[in-house]
Amino acid sequence: MTNPALTAHLISQGRALVRALESLATIAPSGLRERVLARLLLAAYKRRLRAVVAAAPSWVGEEILSASEAIGDKRPALWLGEN
């Protein structure tokens, strides 16, 4: 992967997927419809994240999967800054 713009895009998208998966797994659905939608999104985002990590070099995969580790405890839940 020699294109820096493509690499940065993959890392950005992968980190967003990690955060989305964590959020969907944390939020308790309020009803059947939300539960079904959450399961569908979880399945789709997991599949997409696995594909991105499998296609990227290992160091890019590590950058992506470490997304949640950089979020501090004192930041709001919707903080999207450095990650």
Image (cartoon, rainbow, N blue to C red):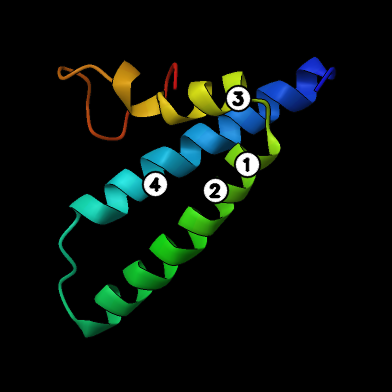
The crowding category of the residue bearing disc 3, from other C-alpha atoms within 10 Å (few below 14, some 14 to 19, many at least 20), is few
According to the image, label 2 marks what residue? Answer: 50
Q: Earlier in the sequence, mark 3 or mark 2?
A: 2
Q: Quadrant of residue 74?
A: top left
Q: Is residue 34 left or right of residue 65?
A: left
Q: Is residue 17 above or below residue 77?
A: below
Residues at circles 3 and 1 in contact by the CB criterion of under 8 Å: no
The amino acid type, in three-letter code, at marker 4 is Ala
The amino acid type, in three-letter code, at marker 1 is Ala
Q: Callout 1: helix, strand or loop?
A: helix
Residues at circles 1 and 2 in contact by the CB criterion of under 8 Å: yes
Residue 64: mark in rendering: none
Residue closer to the observer: 46 or 15: 46
Kindly identify the residue that appears in the image at 33 percent across and 17 percent down: 70
Q: CA distance from mark 3 to mark 4?
A: 21 Å
Residue closer to the observer: 80 or 65: 65
According to the image, label 1 marks what residue? Answer: 54
Q: Earlier in the sequence, mark 2 or mark 4?
A: 4
Residue closer to the observer: 39 or 30: 39
Residue 20: mark in rendering: 4
Q: Is residue 21 above or below residue 58?
A: below
Kindly identify the residue that appears in the image at 63 percent across and 41 percent down: 54
Q: Callout 4: helix, strand or loop?
A: helix
